[in-house]
Amino acid sequence: MAAPVVVSSPVPAPVIRPRILLLDDDPALRKLLCKLLNKEGYEVREASDYDAALAELRGTKMDLVVVNLNAAEDGEKAVRALRRAYAELTMVVWSEAAGLGEGSENLLILPRPSRPITVVSVIAQSLGAAARAGSCQLPA
């Protein structure tokens, strides 16, 4: 009697969802942006202040941090401290002030968007640039 033939299908690779940390003290805006970003396939963590953002960064590798500079308590101080502690991390900062100076390869400073969907578009572009620079990996 011949041995039975066992056909197994390959185990699919886990889906890599880019991780985004959203730092903003407005819970309604965070909820809306999280919903939009999750719908686009991103894993989003929220922080309402600098201390919560640090706790999230200590616990999970993030691909991008998005900060509303004007809404976050001590926003400028938080961005500077996050940049010192996580220099390789790509950040998008929404700001109506120019206190941070010029952006850099992994720091994008933009005016506050008037529509939340604009945030999603800029995040997608920023993650694409970070992936090309090798600082994060996006799904194929």
Image (tube, rainbow, N blue to C red):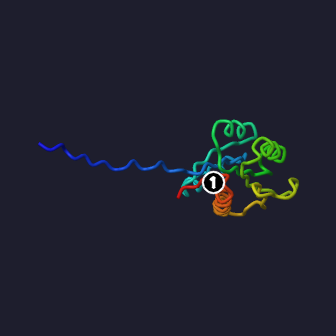
* Percent coordinates x, y for residue 27 in the rendering: 67, 46
For this view, does 129 lie left or right of residue 98?
left
Q: Nearer the viewer, residue 53 or 116?
A: 53
Q: Which residue is rendered at x = 64% and y = 36% of the image? A: 59
Residue at the image point whose x is 73% and y is 45% from the top: 25
Tell which of 94 and 82 is nearer to you. Answer: 82
Image mark count:
1
Label 1 residue SS:
helix
Residue at 69%, 42% in the rendered image: 47
Name the residue rendered at 74%, 48% in the picture.
Answer: 88
Q: Position of residue 9 (x, y in %)?
A: 33, 50
Query: In x, y percent, where is residue 102?
Result: 85, 58
**Amino acid type of the residue that numbered disc 1 sits on in the rendered structure:** Leu
Q: Residues within 10 Å of mark 1 (few under 14, many from 20)?
A: some
> With 38 as the anchor, is 105 left or right in this view?
right
Placement of the N terminus among the 4 image quadrants: top left
Q: Position of residue 61 (x, y in %)?
A: 64, 42
- Residue lying at the far front in this picture: please name it: 2
Say which residue label 1 marks: 33
Q: Nearer the viewer, residue 27 or 88?
A: 88
Above/below status of 54 relative to 87: above
Is 65 rendered above or below residue 113? above
User: Please, is residue 3 above or below residue 116 in the view?
Assistant: above
